[in-house]
Every structure is written in structure tokens, then in C-alpha cells.
Amino acid sequence: MPKHLIGVMGPGNGASPLVEETAYALGQHIARRGWVLLTGGRNVGVMDAASRGAQSAGGLTVGILPTADTTVLSPAVDIPILTDLGNARNNLNVLSSQVVVACGIGLGTVSEIALALKVGKPVIFMRVPAEAVAFFARLSVHSLTATDSVKTAIAWIDEQLRL
């Protein structure tokens, strides 16, 4: 039976401590469900926090890096994918994920949200300002929701995986 690949996208630099705490807890819960965590793979912000959370709970982590430079790799990434594609790697992140979690908001995250909605991936917003969620909700005909509760997010992801 194939594993479910859940993408957690969010800011690298500039993620608030609350956003990083949420990403860490989200990574833990993803791992506890037996799902595989996919991030942008770098050693900063949401990518690192979610990967550390998943690894602490015995989960498998995949990181799709924008460069071939392994010095930026999070030590909590089990399977690094070195792309040397820069921001184009965001498309790989989205297409490889069954569900995309936007944890916090930054320019890279905005592009991943837009790409996910464009290809019909379910998107859940966590710790994202209401006006940003409303903007994407107006543009999308696909499934999206927002919550700041990790338990609610995991239940919604589970529901999306069963559809």
C-alpha cells in the first residue's frame, strides 16, 4: 500500500516562533499517522521545524531543495532531493504532495498555494492571515480550509485522503 505524501510549505526565513511551533507539531502528527512529510528541505523556518517534528516521532521526511548545495539541508531530512531548480522546485513540492499545508505565509508559500490550487490539490491554511485565506478562497474552486488547530488539520487531511 503506497504511503501518503503530505506537503508542509511555509516561510524559511522570518517564520515566527508560533508558526515554527505549529509546523513542528504538525510534523509530529503527520509522522504518527504513518504519512510521509514533504518540505522544501532547508534548515530554516517551517521546513526545518516540520521535518524535526516528524523525525522526533519516527516519521520519514523528504526535502526537495532548490539547489544542489547540501549545506542548506535540514539535518532532519531523510531523503533529500537536490534539484538546482531554484523557485521552480515549488512546482515539484506541490505536484508530489497529496495535500498541501500552508503553515505561515511568505512569497514562496504564496506561489506553492497558487500552484496547488491551480492543479486541484487540497490546501489547508495554518497560521495564515484571514485576508490571505479569503483571497485564495475567491480564486479557487478546489477544496481548501483554514485552522490553527493541528488536530483539526490532521482530521481534514485524513478526510481529503479518503476522497
Image: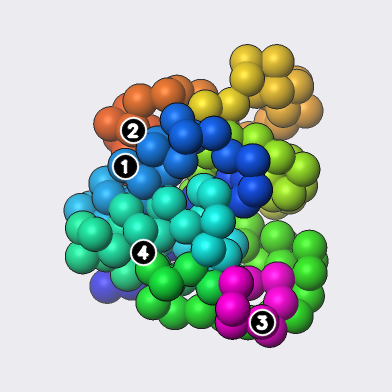
Q: In this view, does 130 lie above or below 158?
A: above
Q: Distance between the residues labelled 4 and 3?
A: 23 Å
Residue at image point 29% right, 63% down: 55
- Residue tagged 2: 150
The residue type indicated by label 4 comes to: Val
- Residue tagged 3: 69
Name the spot of residue 131 as percent of width and height, x first.
Answer: 70, 15
Residue 36: mark? 4
Answer yes or no: do the residues labelled 1 and 3 have beta carbons within 8 Å?
Answer: no
Q: How far apart are marks 1 and 3 (CA)?
A: 27 Å
Residue at image point 70% right, 60% down: 90
Res. 121 in view: no
Answer yes or no: do the residues labelled 4 and 3 have beta carbons within 8 Å?
Answer: no
Q: Give the residues in magenta.
A: 65-72
| Closer to us: 75 or 119 | 75
Q: Distance between the residues labelled 4 and 2?
A: 16 Å
The residue type indicated by label 3 comes to: Asp
Answer yes or no: do the residues labelled 4 and 1 have beta carbons within 8 Å?
Answer: no
